[in-house]
Image (spheres, rainbow, N blue to C red):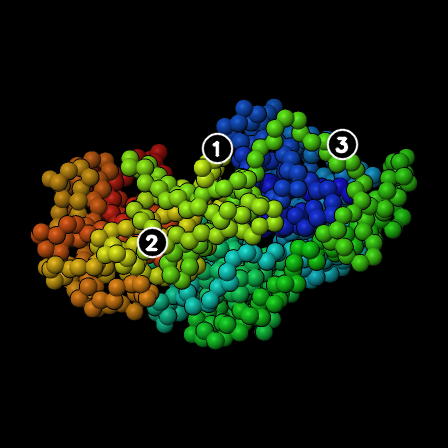
């Protein structure tokens, strides 16, 4: 049977997209599945669809594409589907117009699918108006009845009457729809979103990190979460909060974090996919919404063994969480109630472990295979009913009996061959592209990197794993032979280990490949399925062969496996940053194998990128070891004299301004004869801190250049620098 999903944009990372990825993959075990994206905004989806699922786009919105259609003449004409609300009124980049009318309507009239599933109100409207009686028409509600404004609600409710079924993701919402639409002939029911069990290692719940993830929009109430964390931050000084996602609320949240002085404890991490690797870094997962139609993030976190604190908001959380596997906070308890729940779980690792174990068991009930079977049951039940609009097609009887024959009956035989109602597609002419080799990387407890290669994706023949230091004039690389039988049919996945004590890993970025071992097999870059960094959360750099060392695997922007390495004779790891109106104060810990001078003789030099004539020096002060300093068995344990602090007066840099943008890199000098020591953050699990560890900027006056924006920041090497930049004060400026 052919099943088609109609979705607005399959190229993002939102909850509807993730739900469609999961369900389409599970249905592809037994059916021909297509996902039709109204818009294409990038060359490939951010979330990987199953290779058996065909992905089709109706409108090309890639601005650099030769087939870009954002300026199509029909975009100047109004949309006729819910024109006074919905996507026609409220979208920005993907504003609905007559072009969407034309493309969606044409596809619905021409598709050969036997089931079409629409995924948002506007698309449910198109399916009701332009859909055909020769296929099942099923609408989905990924929000809830109460989430829509009254106009959109009325439009969608009218459209539901023309559908065969309408599926919500919570039982409470299905009941609400049935009460609102008692006479609608469409079947209204709940089938929750499916959430697969990830391949990541579950959290050990000892990271002292609270994790939240989702769109940064008002209904998610991340302001409530930040304020609640602020109330308990002083009681739990080792804990931090990470918010993953993007959205319009980001500037507002950034301001709130800075106002509370939490910029070194609360981090806006940006969007990450797959998100499971980040849930596994958490000891607590947080949901603070005013409304959650389902709560996919809740189940994702539960799969990773992380207990969830959620507001008891309509409708989904209470259908997933109970007192045995998480914590529900009444909405009317507000910030104080949420802070109480945070405090309770932060203080009790044994409670977190008990809830986390139960959470993993609860998450299993949302397996995609089980929920795909519920959709198949729905198709079967609908096929057994007389059609409401049979007169619309003369071919109804023949087609409908074929659909019934294509549906599974009896016990689930998932994974076994089943008859297909449509012929298999013809193979493509010409040579087929080779399957790219796939890798799974994980930080181990020994701070080495374990890399598992997917045997089924490897080219045949003897192979080597190859890591090459990027842009290295010396061409340094590491080559490790894979087991001879690695590419034999049915062979287990080969694994290799990169250990800083065994492999020389100079500082930089390393690209990873497989290549032929004495054969003509060409070098192929490794696609990264997962890069797990959870065991590095909170860890300090290690001392390996007299070098301060850190190694992390990560996924590049284009989806490949890479390694980020740091290797330095000495390094000052920052443990805290605070800012004032005219200065910044930094605390750090010196890591080194050999210290030729006592630390009380140390100074910090701000090294100007304009030349040494603009350098300046500030003194350091020995500091007590803060309670937040992480240690690992491989970390050199040093006495309190190796903790120090220094203050950067912005006035010292202002007096040396020489251009529109001046930058000073900060270095520690321990005695006049010693080489400079970098000051930054190379420990932990963050590859690039420039966008996550954000220090507030302040505006200060300058006698000749006017208002200057002063801001400490982390560079691309995760080292600390000071930026002074001109501020454009013209009326046209938005700075």
Q: Residue at x 39, y 69 (%)?
A: 232
- In the rendered image, the quadrant that contains the C terminus is top left
Secondary structure at badge 3 equals helix
Q: Is residue 62 visible?
A: yes
Choose mark 1 or mark 3, whichever is in front. 1
Q: Which mark is residue 110?
A: 3
Choose mark 1 or mark 2, whichever is in front. 1
Q: Nearer the viewer, residue 299 or 190?
A: 299
Mark 1 = which residue? Answer: 520
Mark 2 = which residue? Answer: 502
Going from N to C along the chain, the mark reached first, 2 or 3, is: 3
Locate residue 39 relative to residue 592 in the image: left or right: right
Q: Residue 325 at what x, y percent from top left? A: 57, 70
Q: Residue 412 at what x, y percent from top left? A: 77, 57
Q: Residues within 10 Å of mark 3 (few under 14, many from 20)?
A: few
Q: Nearer the viewer, residue 471 or 3?
A: 471
Can you tell which quarter of the image residue 183 is in? bottom right
Circles 1 and 3: CB distance less than 8 Å? no
Between marks 1 and 2, how big is the CA–CA gap?
28 Å
Locate residue 168 relative to residue 732 in the image: left or right: right
Q: Nearer the viewer, residue 162 or 445?
A: 445
Q: Residue at x 30, y 58 (%)?
A: 541
Q: Residues within 10 Å of mark 2 (few under 14, many from 20)?
A: few
């Amino acid at each position: 049977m052919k099943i088609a999903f109609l979705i607005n944009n399959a190229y993002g990372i939102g909850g509807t997209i993730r739900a469609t990825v999961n369900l389409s993959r599970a249905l592809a075990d037994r059916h021909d599945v297509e996902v039709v994206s109204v818009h294409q905004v990038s060359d490939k989806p951010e979330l990987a669809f199953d290779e058996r699922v065909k992905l089709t786009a109706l409108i090309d919105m890639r601005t650099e594409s030769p087939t870009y259609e954002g300026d199509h003449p029909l975009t100047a004409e109004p949309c006729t589907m819910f024109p006074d609300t919905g996507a026609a009124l409220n979208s920005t980049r993907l504003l609905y117009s007559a072009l969407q009318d034309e493309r969606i309507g044409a596809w619905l009239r021409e598709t050969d699918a036997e089931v079409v599933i629409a995924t948002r109100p506007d698309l449910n409207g198109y399916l009701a108006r332009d859909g055909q009686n020769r296929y099942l028409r099923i609408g989905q509600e990924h929000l809830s009845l109460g989430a829509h404004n009254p106009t959109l609600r009325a439009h969608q409710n009218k459209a539901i009457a023309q559908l065969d079924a309408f599926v919500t993701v919570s039982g409470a919402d299905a009941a609400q729809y049935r009460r609102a639409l008692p006479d609608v002939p469409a079947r209204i029911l709940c089938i929750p979103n499916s959430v697969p069990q990830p391949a990541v290692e579950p959290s050990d719940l000892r990271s002292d990190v609270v994790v939240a993830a989702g769109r940064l929009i008002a209904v998610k109430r991340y302001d409530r979460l930040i304020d609640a964390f602020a109330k308990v931050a002083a009681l739990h000084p080792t804990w931090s909060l990470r918010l993953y996602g993007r959205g319009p609320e980001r500037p507002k949240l950034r301001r709130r974090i800075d106002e509370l002085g939490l910029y070194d404890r609360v981090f806006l991490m940006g969007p990450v996919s797959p998100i499971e690797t980040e849930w596994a870094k958490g000891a607590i997962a947080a949901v603070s919404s005013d409304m959650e139609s389902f709560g996919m993030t809740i189940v994702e976190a539960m799969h990773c063994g992380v207990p969830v604190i959620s507001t008891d908001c309509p409708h989904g959380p209470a259908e997933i969480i109970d007192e045995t596997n998480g914590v529900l906070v009444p909405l009317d308890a507000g910030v104080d109630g949420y802070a109480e729940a945070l405090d309770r779980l932060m203080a009790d690792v044994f409670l977190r472990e008990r809830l986390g174990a139960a959470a993993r068991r609860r998450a299993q009930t949302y397996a995609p295979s089980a929920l795909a079977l519920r959709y198949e049951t729905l198709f079967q039940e609908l096929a057994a009913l007389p059609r409401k609009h049979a007169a619309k097609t003369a071919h109804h009887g023949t087609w409908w009996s074929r659909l019934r024959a294509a549906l599974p009956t009896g016990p689930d035989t998932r994974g076994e061959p089943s008859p297909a109602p449509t012929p298999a597609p013809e193979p493509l002419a010409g040579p087929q592209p080779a399957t790219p080799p796939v890798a799974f990387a994980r930080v181990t407890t020994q701070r080495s990197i374990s890399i598992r290669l997917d045997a089924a994706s490897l080219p045949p023949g003897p192979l080597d794993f190859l890591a090459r230091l990027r842009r290295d004039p010396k061409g340094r690389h590491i080559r490790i032979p894979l087991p001879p039988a690695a590419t034999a049919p049915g062979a287990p996945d080969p694994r290799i280990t990169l250990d800083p004590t065994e492999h020389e890993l100079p500082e930089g970025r390393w690209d990873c490949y497989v290549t032929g071992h004495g054969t003509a097999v060409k070098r192929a870059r490794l696609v990264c399925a997962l890069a797990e960094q959870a065991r590095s959360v909170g860890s300090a750099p290690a001392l390996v062969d007299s070098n301060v060392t850190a190694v992390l695997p990560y996924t590049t922007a284009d989806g490949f496996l890479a390694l980020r390495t740091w290797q330095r004779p000495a390094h000052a790891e920052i443990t805290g940053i605070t800012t004032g109106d005219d200065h910044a104060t930094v605390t750090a810990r010196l890591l080194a194998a050999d210290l030729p001078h006592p630390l009380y003789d140390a100074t910090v030099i701000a090294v100007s990128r304009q030349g040494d004539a603009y350098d300046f020096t500030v003194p350091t002060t020995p500091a007590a070891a803060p309670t937040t300093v992480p240690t690992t068995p491989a970390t050199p344990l040093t006495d309190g004299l190796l903790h120090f602090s220094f203050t950067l007066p912005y006035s010292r840099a202002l007096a040396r301004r020489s251009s529109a943008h001046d930058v000073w890199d900060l270095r520690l000098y321990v005695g006049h004869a010693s080489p400079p020591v970098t000051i930054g953050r190379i420990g932990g699990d963050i590859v690039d801190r420039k966008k996550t560890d954000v220090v507030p900027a302040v505006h200060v006056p300058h006698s000749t250049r006017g208002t200057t924006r002063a801001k400490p920041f982390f560079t691309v090497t995760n080292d600390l620098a000071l930026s002074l930049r001109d501020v454009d004060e013209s009326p046209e400026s938005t700075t």
